[in-house]
Image (spheres, grey):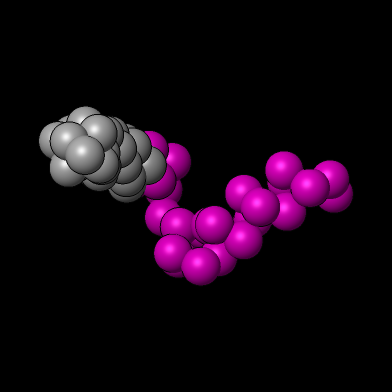
């Protein structure tokens, strides 16, 4: 088991995804990706607005 496989396994065990069906796991991962996109967008807007203001 290489490093990437271990991290995927740890992700599945941490969030309990190992007991879900493939479509439930896919739906959860899509929601996580969308949430991360919103977070990254918010952080970049925050940096542009407040950090580069100085």
At x 53% / y 57%, what residue is drawn?
12
Q: Which residues are magenta?
A: 1-27
Question: Looking at the picture, how far across and down is residue 34, in whole percent?
Answer: 25, 36
- Horizontally, residue 1 falls left or right of residue 9, namely right
Question: In which image quadrant can residue 4 be found?
Answer: top right
The one of 19 and 13 positioned closer to us in this rendering: 13
Please determine whether, in this image, residue 14 is positioned above or below residue 33.
below
Q: Quadrant of the C terminus?
A: top left
- Horizontally, residue 35 falls left or right of residue 22, namely left
- Horizontally, residue 2 falls left or right of residue 10, namely right
Question: Looking at the picture, how far across and down is residue 15, in whole percent?
Answer: 44, 64
Question: Looking at the picture, how far across and down is residue 8, in whole percent?
Answer: 62, 49
At x 62% / y 61%, what residue is drawn?
10
- Horizontally, residue 15 falls left or right of residue 3, namely left
Extreme front residue here?
Answer: 54
- The answer to whether residue 25 is magenta is yes
At x 85% / y 49%, what residue is drawn?
1
At x 17% / y 42%, what residue is drawn?
50
Residue 45 in view in this figure: yes
Residue 23 in view in this figure: no
Question: In which image quadrant can residue 30 be found?
Answer: top left
The one of 41 and 48 positioned closer to us in this rendering: 48
Q: How many marks?
A: 0
Question: Looking at the picture, how far across and down is residue 20, in whole percent?
Answer: 41, 55
- For the stretch drawn in magenta, the main secondary structure is helix
């Amino acid at each position: 088991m290489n490093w990437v496989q271990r991290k995927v396994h740890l992700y599945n065990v941490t969030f309990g995804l190992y007991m879900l069906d493939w479509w439930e796991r896919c739906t959860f991962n899509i929601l996580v990706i969308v949430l991360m996109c919103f977070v990254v967008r918010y952080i970049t807007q925050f940096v542009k607005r407040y950090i580069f203001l100085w």
